[in-house]
């Protein structure tokens, strides 16, 4: 099982769109995929379920909010009990033996995130507070070790555009981090800062783990940046437009994060109106031949799944 956090605390850069479409393409290639919606905006969940469905079938019982909402996440409900299988997208996988499952989110997760952070205090001894730090930050990582998750090939975690405690639990749980970004000044400016913040979290976590007393079951973490994937790229004559090309090159040359060769093109036809059909746009468009956007996205899937050593026999 490979666990990948899809994160960038810049909002609106295409995290959720990438998570939904990459998950769907991986499932169509025969992989068993679990998507985890950790964003209170709940956009990933609404990419697969209608708002009515969410209200009637998911809201009270089957959302990640329930899991985080305890003195220690997971005390009241186990993560695996929250998994749902969205029908429309799975029907659209055709003959594939793959599957796409989801742990839905809840708009109220925002309050839980703040409460969780407050719970980091509350112990008086140094060992106690380190233990609490490890237990809270490591909660998702521990929960994903449940044997009921072991059949999944790939877990994609759609993070909220912030560096709150819930996002940090995703980073601790992940072996890999994928960073969607737009090729513009403000988006590229924050990338090194993001890498620095992740490194700081990893360092603190491992420092507490190494301070043996009270580290419990937690081992060291070492999430690796798969890279930045540029999204909403405007293509002209088969190339990114000049202004965007310059930002992509700049990050390529000067940033501490690797840049993926593949990009996601700007296409409202393919990536707009997420959710209405419950089937990610790339899957809907894949029936057409000679669709450049589909081809590009397939290359991206090759690159990401290849780096995760998940390509090959699954097609
Ligand atoms: N490649 C694309 N081409 C055209 N539109 C896109 C593309 N990718 C995403 N969009 C659109 O841009 C908007 C933002 O995308 P998305 O919700 O995936 O970003 P996000 O990073 O998850 O946002 P947030 O930070 O709010 O969670 C959405 O309306 C989506 O439909
Ligand atoms: Mg999002």
Image: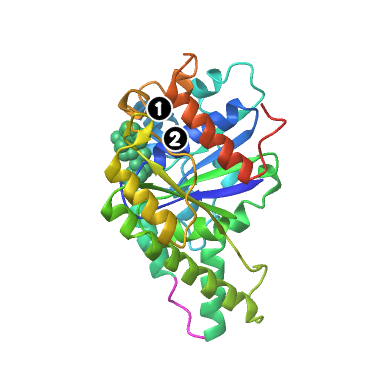
Q: What is the quadrant of the N terminus in the image?
A: top right
Magenta span: 120-125
- Is residue 214 visible to the viewer in this orientation of the structure? no
Q: Is residue 204 left or right of residue 186?
A: right
Mark 1 burial class by Cα count in 10 Å: few <14, some 14-19, many 20+: few
Question: Which x, y percent locates residue 239?
Answer: 37, 35
The quadrant where residue 149 appears = top right
Q: Is 56 situated above or below 78?
A: above
C-alpha distance separating marks 2 and 1: 7 Å
- Label 1, on which residue? 53
Write the residue at 57% across / 83% down.
Answer: 127
Q: Residues within 10 Å of mark 2 (few under 14, many from 20)?
A: many
Circle 2 is placed at which residue position? 58
Contact? badges 2 and 1 (CB < 8 Å)? yes
Whether disc 2's CB lies below 8 Å from ligand 2 is answered: no
Nearer-the-camera pick, 58 or 261:
261
Q: Quadrant of residue 242?
A: top left
**Residue 203 appearing in the image:** yes
Q: How many marks?
A: 2
Q: Is residue 242 left or right of residue 198?
A: left
Percent across and percent down for residue 73 are 52, 58
**Which residue sits at x=66%, y=80%?**
212
- Is-magenta flag for residue 167? no
Q: Reply above or below: 92 against 274.
A: above
| Among the 4 quarters of the image, the one containing residue 94 | top right
Q: Residue at x 40, y 27 (%)?
A: 53
> In the image, which disc is placed on residue 164?
none
- Up the image or down, 275 lies above or below 159; here it is above
Between 105 and 288, the residue placed more toward the observer is 288
Q: Earlier in the sequence, mark 2 or mark 1?
A: 1
Residues 258 and 225: in front is 258
């Amino acid at each position: 099982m490979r666990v990948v956090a899809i994160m960038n605390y810049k909002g609106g850069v295409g995290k959720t769109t990438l998570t939904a479409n990459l998950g769907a393409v991986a499932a169509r290639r025969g992989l068993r995929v679990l998507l985890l919606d950790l964003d209170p905006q709940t956009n990933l969940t609404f990419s697969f379920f209608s708002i009515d469905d969410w209200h009637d079938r998911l809201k009270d019982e089957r959302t990640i909010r329930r899991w985080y909402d305890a003195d220690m996440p997971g005390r009241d409900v186990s993560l695996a009990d929250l998994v749902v299988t969205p029908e429309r997208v799975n029907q659209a996988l055709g003959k594939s033996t793959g599957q796409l499952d989801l742990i839905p989110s809840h708009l109220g997760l925002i309050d839980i995130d703040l409460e969780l952070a407050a719970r980091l205090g509350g112990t008086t001894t140094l060992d106690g507070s380190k233990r609490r730090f490890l237990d809270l930050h490591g909660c998702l990582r521990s929960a994903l070790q449940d044997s009921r998750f072991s059949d999944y090939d790939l877990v994609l975690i759609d993070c909220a555009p912030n560096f709150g405690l819930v996002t940090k639990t995703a980073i601790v749980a992940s072996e890999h981090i994928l960073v969607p970004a737009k090729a513009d000044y403000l988006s590229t400016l924050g990338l090194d800062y993001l890498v620095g913040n992740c490194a700081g979290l990893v360092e603190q976590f491992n420092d507490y783990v190494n301070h043996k007393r009270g580290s419990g079951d937690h081992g060291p973490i070492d999430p690796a940046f798969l890279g930045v994937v540029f999204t909403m790229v405007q293509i002209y004559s088969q190339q990114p437009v000049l202004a965007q090309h310059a930002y992509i090159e700049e990050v390529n040359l000067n940033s501490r994060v690797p840049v993926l060769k593949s990009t996601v093109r700007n296409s409202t036809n393919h990536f707009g109106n997420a959710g209405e059909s419950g089937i990610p746009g790339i899957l809907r468009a894949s029936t057409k031949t000679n669709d450049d956007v589909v081809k590009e996205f397939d290359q991206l899937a090759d690159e990401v799944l290849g780096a995760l050593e998940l390509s090959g026999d699954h097609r």
